[in-house]
Amino acid sequence: MENKLKKYPALICARGGSKGVPGKNIRKLAGIPLIGHAILKAMEVENISEVFVSTDSDEIAEVARKYGAIVPFRRPEYLAEDDSPEWKVWQHAVRYLQDNYGKPFFGMVVIPATAPLRSAEDIRRCVETFEENDCDCVITVTEAHRSPYFNMVLTTEDGYSHLVIEREEHVFRRQDVPVVYDMTTVAYVVHPEFVLSAENIFSGKVKHVVIPVERALDIDTELDFKIAEFLLKSVGEK
């Protein structure tokens, strides 16, 4: 018998008060609002049933609905401050879905609005990794350009710089130290009960999917927007 495709709700968290880039989540990139890129990519993934948006902004909600997302509630103000932990926003959304979704779900896909260069295949790989492994959460990463064992330093109280992680034997080559990764905001897949019971992602069993660096750009500054525009233009010209 053919296995039935498991369906997941997708969550996009998009707050209205971005200070680094005002109006970031609805700012257009290649003619599409940033949140629109996330919604459209999510809808390409066969495992995703509906796309939900958690926001405190009426303007973001209007744009999200235009691109086909569901905005079933207004995010509470205490979860929309500069210092509001996104983990708490995930918990709020999971509780809402458990109470109102109308169908059981054993996993939720979280798709941040700030990584518009992701592919649908990146999201599919996260879902596959989640289903094929005993884990609570799947994260996305890229290969790190710096290593805390080799060329990342911190300044201690004495005012001198030291390696973040020092080893007894001196290291001269990156190849001689453990491989490390940078976390990205391409996608996450999580067990709902894990989100509700844990304090953070790394409280549980975590697997990762490696994403090419050119698809993992996280937009947080004006420079990031310019880089994203350049990369999208380069892809379009090929």
Image (cartoon, helix red, strand yellow):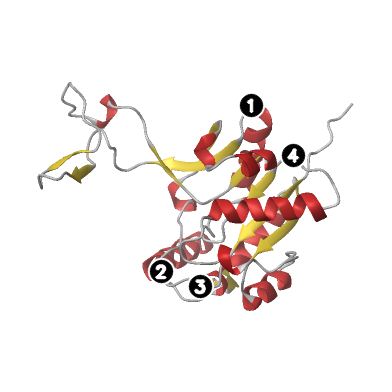
- Which of disc 1 and disc 4 is earlier in sequence? 4
Check disc 1 and give the amino acid type: Asp
How far is the residue under mark 3 from the one under mark 4? 31 Å
Query: Would you name the residue on which mark 4 appears?
Result: 106
Asked if the residue under mark 2 is in contact with the one under mark 1, i.e. CB atoms within 8 Å, the reply is no
Q: Quadrant of residue 69?
A: bottom right
How far is the residue under mark 4 from the one under mark 1? 13 Å
Query: Would you name the residue on which mark 2 appears?
Result: 226
Query: Would you name the residue on which mark 1 appears?
Result: 134
Residue 171 location in percent, x, y? 19, 27
User: Under tag 4, what secondary structure?
Assistant: loop
Residue 74 is at least partly visible in this image: yes
The number of numbered badges drawn on the structure is: 4
How far is the residue under mark 4 from the one under mark 2? 38 Å
- Which of disc 1 and disc 3 is earlier in sequence? 3
User: Under tag 1, what secondary structure?
Assistant: loop
Residue 167 location in percent, x, y? 21, 25
Asked if the residue under mark 1 is in contact with the one under mark 4, i.e. CB atoms within 8 Å, the reply is no
Q: Quadrant of residue 190?
A: top right
